[in-house]
Amino acid sequence: MIQGIPLEHFLVVSTIMFFIGVCGFIIRRNLITMLMAIELILNSVNINFVVFNRYLYPDQLQGQFFSLFIVGIAAAEASVAIALIINIYRNVKNIEVENVNEMKF
Amino acid sequence: MDLGQFILMRHELLLTVAALAILVAEIFTSEKNKSKLINFALVLFALVTFIGFIPGETGNLFGGSFQSSQLTVFMKNVLNLAVLIVFLQAEGWLRKPENADKISEYFILTLSTLIGMNFMVSAGDFLIFYIGLETATIPIAGLAAFDKYKSESAEAGIKLILSSALSSGILLFGLSMIYGATGSIYFADIATKVAPNALIALGFVFFVSGMGFKISLVPFHFWTADVYEGAPINVTSYLSVVSKGAAAFIFTIVLFTVFKNIVELWKPMIYTLAIATMTIGNLFAMRQNNIKRFLAFSSIAQAGFILLGILGAGELGMTAIVYFVLVYVFTNLGAFGVVAAIHNASGVETISGYNGLYQTNPKLSWLMTISLFSLAGIPPIAGFFGKFFLFTAAAGSGYYILVLIAVLNATISLYYYLLVIKAIFIEKNEQPIPEFRSSNSMRIALVMCITGVLVTGFASGVFEYIRSISKLFLN
Amino acid sequence: MNILTLLVLIPVLTMVVVLFTKDYKGARLASAIGMGIELIATVYLVLAYLAARKTGMMHEMLFTSDFMWYPSLNIHFAFGVDGIAVAMIGLTSIVIFAGIFASWELQFLTKEFFVSLILLVTAVYGFFISLDLFTMFLFYELALIPMYLLIGLWGTGPKEKSAMKLTLMLMAGSALIMVGILGLYYNSAPGGGPLTFNIIEISKISIPVAAQRFFFPFAFVGFGILGALFPFHTWSPDGHASAPTAVSMLHAGVLMKLGGYGCFRVAMFLMPQAAQEMAWIFIILTTISVVYGAFSAIWQTDLKFINAYSSVSHCGLVIFALLMMNETAMDGAILQMISHGLMTALFFALIGMIYGRTHTRDIRQMGGLMKVIPFLAVVYMIAGFASLGLPGLSGFVAEMTVFVGSFQHQDMFHRVVTVIVASSIVITAVYILKVVGVLLLGPLKDQHHADLEDAKWYEKLSTVTLVLAVAAIGIAPLWLSDTIVASLKPIVARLAMVIPF
Amino acid sequence: MTGYTYTVFIILIPLVMFLVTGLLGMKWKPIISGLLGTIGMGTSWTLSLITAASYFFGHHAEGFQTIIPFEMKWLQFTDSLIIKMGILLDPISVMMLVVITTISFMVHLYSIGYMHGEVGFQRFYAFLSLFTFSMLGLVIATNIFQMYIFWELVGVSSFLLIGFYYQKPSAVAASKKAFIVTRFADLGFLIGILILSFITGTFDFGKLTEPGTAIFGSAASMSFMGISAMTWAMTLIFIGGAGKSAMFPLHIWLPDAMEGPTPVSALIHAATMVVAGVFLVARMFPVIHFQAPAAQEIIGYVGGFTSLFAAVIAITQYDIKRVLAFSTLSQLGYMMLALGVSGYGGEEGLGYMASMFHLFTHAMFKALLFLGAGSIIHAVHSNNMYDMGGLRKYLPITHITFLIACLTIAGVPFLSGFFSKDEILVAALHHNKLLFAVEFIVAGLTAFYMFRLYFCVFWGKDRHYHHTPHESPLTMTIPLMFLAVASVFAGYLPFTELVTSDKLGFESEMNYMVAVPSVLIGLLGIGLAWILYKKESEVPAKLAKSWGILYTATYNKFYFDEIYLFVTRKIIFNYISRPIAWFDRHIIDAFMVGIGLTTEKVSYKIKGMQSGQLQHYAFAFVAGTLALALSMIYLMM
């Protein structure tokens, strides 16, 4: 039990992480970096779940389980994503996102 | 709990078995007769689909995390049917040499997404729901990038995986808020605890946008066109029908059951989304030349119509949506089937390429026409009934103006469907697509679609059945 | 076997047969026979109807049959006819019969042509016999769709554009209708109980006035668009000009009548209060379209445009008379529908035949055809006389009934607009005589036309059928008019229930 | 009283003739249809003579009954408004039967010779029968709507006959003009009927004209724009009559109508159809007289003005048929005027009687004049009277008959014209001095222009004809002679006993105060013509010059055709119809199309949204989410 750290702090952190992630996803040009931004988002979510669970509903574990699953799935997602990024690299010889705009309008 | 209860999740199990079986079979088949796998998979899956239709008991598993009701079972069967049709249509394409070494992958990936959807459909809590969602999404990215040497395909894949990741991230963020507000991830519990407060509202919005991504509602729809265009046709049709249908279904269920307390909160939201989706979808579809992109936008517009059903909250809305999804399966797969057939035969996938098709391939032309008319909602084809019931549902809760807008949108959509028909029938063309005969399985698939399109409307039993089971489901 | 279901079945079977014919000869023969049988069936229906009435069956609708279709929404296949519907069916059968022969020589994708043509007709029959708003709407939309291909594939001139315009405008109209119908449905049981689409049942209760005020414009304008209600008529000139002969005949002759029919059967009959209140708006609109159509017809030079605009004028008269809401005027409206249907079909048939010979529809390039193709010319004159209301032809009967009926209205405003509308007969005379004078009389203008051949047997058959019908109504109108009036009584009674002003 | 059922055949025979010759005429030799038509006409002529005899000279102690031997329902509007097809026999209708059948028979006979060898001989006879049928139907109408029906039919058959030479543009134009002008007038008639039926709730002449009927009870209260409803109704109905009878200012079609074959002019545009208007007014006379005196005034003045106006124009015309046409106008004016000034009952009804009387006599001598003109034209192949001269030795019979006719119309004593015209003058004198003066002058003018015509044609020196004129065949001269006899003796029929406003005879004696001066002025006119035109001389030309502008104006019929042309062509076509057509294409249609185009334009405008950039999508995604969130929060506030 972490003493003296109120719930809000965690939430603030998680929220900030979330929005950093979102902004990163929107701003950064490199596909890998965008992927990392996604990880940020997911982890902020994890924090949320765990914290809510720990502080508000300490008598159950749903939140923590949920975050475990999220971690797992995030891993899968990342792996597939990276595979595809490699595939992109094969085709366009770099991984800048703005080059991935063959199809538009 | 005893193992006998697992019969409740027979669909999921069967599919898993099928997927594994194909995997194993792939290991034990030699390089040269890989293509036999196709027949094997087809037969196997046809079997699975058939078994799925055998009525069995319904109930809950894992303390309500997994709920199986007649409605969900029906939905799963619809999905199976759709996938079967997709497989049949894919057969000719898979036999092409460039796909020789990826046959089993196609089936396994598709099946695993289907499993995910099945779980999603009968999810009883947000965890299962989320797992199902991701299982249903991630492999599709792989499928979208199936033609790995085509840059469009790769692009489609990356666009899909990244934006889906973002959307699921946002969705999760919403879920976490809802969890924080209600302290549960079980639909049943949440439903009781949901109240119109800021946290719930935010969580709900994030949830909606996450789902909006799957159903490709405006403004969460942008990935759709590009992915549909880039992905191989059979994947596209799968995306546009199966995954969208499943998502729409579960979305409806969650709104009707979990968030029914804040119905007054989400109705205006859905209202705006509906209008935006229909209109934007139509406006973009109007000037497309690539048939896949065209169908992508048209499917976006169709999603907008589905929202009308959601607005007609309650049993009729539920029925209308499920019915519409069913009709939509036949209709859209019919259209995509023709597109695939033509693509396999001639590589053409532009509307202008279809000019004068009727001179050489009248049968296909009529198929296309009927499917498109059904999409446009022209009687007496199934599409008309699907739309009409959606509108009836919406009108039932007094949204007459929305109905008017929707029908006017349907008129616009008729305009661009007619453009295709014009290309097929009226436009002159010196060298139209040469006459060809598509593979038997494709023919079977198309026949299934067309019969579905022509019969569903007149056979009122279907609608009545759905109505009865959704009544059961909702109370 | 109910005669009405038979009426729908025959065309369907005909379509099937046509699908299995070898060449264009077979196709046209099959459809001719099919429509011939249909015509006979119609005659039988008329006789049966009159006989039934004579034996004193006083029900609103006869030959009713009712199959439950969608129980949970209470949607039925409910069929039945009253005198008006019977009259409309008669009109349809005659026009399609003539239409088949008018397109006898068509050889490009003949099979498809006849199939879609007959599909169109099937829908029309379905519409007229429907007692259930849902099926009615279903057949209505079904009737609109084959139009696109018919015009787009076999039309002339800017056919794609016109076809698209026509289809979209009419579909927009049906969008309005859809809203109106749903509104009716949800208000069909103000006192509780099951909602219904059934016209007769709805007509027994009275829809809440607020709802009427909201939904009447939707239903009325929706159908009005097909009835060429000003200012939503602009699809009609282009559409008719581009359409092939038979399609113009059918569309102007029959399909536009769906509009008028729906206007009073759905909008006015089911929402009388609103009809009473809002009538004046549409009376003004229709007055405009009557005069306006006639005037713009004067200036046209394309035969089909002239006829299209005169159709605007005549169909305006139909809706005008309907809005007068008294027995005589509405009787006149129905008569006008039939008479206009017949003579406009005749016109389009003749225009098609003349075009087929001279390859132009511009009256400035033709002249003195009376000498060359006397038969067609004479029939054209008869058609012209019918349309300018010469006694002894149907036009006169219809118009006079309309005028007398409308003028019986107690309100001064109605009488004044009646006078305005009546003045259109002079304008009609002007443009009809202009055409006749330029096209048929005078010296032969273009020497290439010197050796045109006169009508062939099938052309004669097609035109004479219509001429006979026109003359029959014109000479002995009484039985028809009485039949219609008898069926109008309940409708008028319902409309008369409420006099807001 | 069903003793008269056979009268049905008077009407049916021409109809049958029309159908037979119309449908089968092309099959057989032309002459057959001619003979058939003539025989048919002869039969109904005899029948109507029988009818007349038994009607007039049967017993009629207490005046003539109105007999309806046959009537059937044709179309029912309301319980009371019913169009019936029937036969109504009363003095005027019976008289008209006689007039029509007589003239028609004569014309049928005459045309065998006149139209011989023409293309469309059968068509001609078919149309003649059609016309006769419609005209008979008109006069025996039992209700005003039946009258209107046949009224329209008459109009159309006149259209067909004027345009008989349909390849001649002038003929086509004339026929169109005739039809449209009369059609315009018919609109008035129709509206009149509508108002009348609205007030009285009936079409039947029986109910309308019965003395002291109560159906007009409601009428008094009704008025529109300050004028009583009945006045409106009657004036409008009169406009209808004026159109057919070519009253000023609707007279313009009649002169052009002479484009038709001459027998047609004789039948339709001199004897029968053009008097339909007069007949209509006479038919409605009690209503007009009692319910709408104002309308009657109008009728009187219009009649008077027309007669003067037409007479003046007639003086300056060269075309022989046009001269006759204008004289017809003038005579019709007489009849209208007589009705306008008439009272009701006994002596008062003198004008009514006179009008009918003049109608009768005029039919005879004007038909004679036209047929004579026909035979002249037949001989000379020209309408222009300055191409003629000295014809009296070539065409003796024509000459004599024509002279008789001229004398008759000029009102020379003891010929029929004298009596009828005299009665009219007397009636005018009793009621309205001004109108009397006008008519008095017109009498002189009539005499003058008729004899101007006569002398120019039959006297003066020969023109060189490309072949010597020869007398017409017997088929043509017999009618001439018959009609000559008729126009001499028609005046001795006791009209005062037979045809009167209240169907009761009355005594009337010569009013020498009127008769003598009118005869004198007639003779004066003749004398003037004698001096000017008997011998070839420069005087007329000089005179014409001296009148200058006035003369040219008169010669050009006071430019009425031009005015009408201006109104129709310029105003209606260019300034109404054309802008409307333009408006329809470029405003309304453009608007409808515009909606579509705008939609398409928009779809092109917004295509940039789908930029293909993943991050733009992501941004839109997030922005959308936040927007929704904000709106959500807003909603909850």
Image (tube, coloured by chain):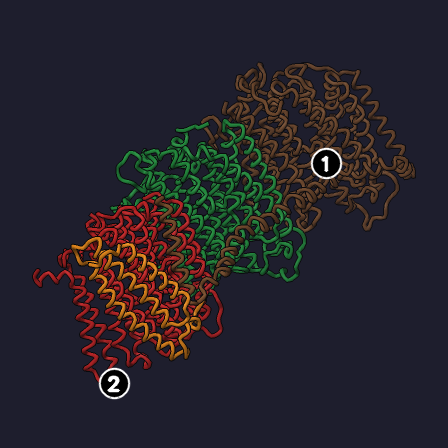
Which of the image's four quarters has the N terminus of chain B?
A: bottom left
Q: Secondary structure at mark 2?
A: loop
Report which colour depicts chain B. Answer: red
Q: Which mark is residue C1?
A: none
Residue D300 image position (x, y, % from top left): 70, 24
User: How far apart are labels 1 and 2 at the CA level?
Assistant: 115 Å
Asked if residue B428 shows in the view, the reply is yes
- Within 10 Å of the Cα at label 1, are there few (<14), some (14-19), or many (20+) other Cα atoms? many
Residue C472, compared with residue C300, is above or below; it is above
Q: Quadrant of residue B7?
A: bottom left
Which residue is drawn at the image coordinates 62% and 33% (left, top)?
D101
Q: Nearer the viewer, mark 1 or mark 2?
A: 2
Contact? badges 1 and 2 (CB < 8 Å): no
In this view of the protein, which residue sits in the foreground, D298 or B289?
Answer: B289
**Residue closest to the far left:** B2
Residue B83 image position (x, y, % from top left): 26, 67
**Left or right, residue A72 beside residue D500:** left
Q: Secondary structure at mark 1?
A: helix
The amino acid at mark 1 is Leu
Question: Chain in brown?
Answer: D
- Within 10 Å of the Cα at label 2, are there few (<14), some (14-19), or many (20+) other Cα atoms? few
Report which colour depicts chain C. Answer: green
Report which colour depicts chain A. Answer: orange
Identify the residue position indicated by label 2 in the image.
B32
Residue D327 image position (x, y, % from top left): 75, 33
Q: Are marks 1 and 2 on the same chain?
A: no
Asked if residue C379 shows in the view, the reply is no
The amino acid at mark 2 is Lys
Identify the residue position indicated by label 1 in the image.
D480
Q: Chain of mark 2?
A: B
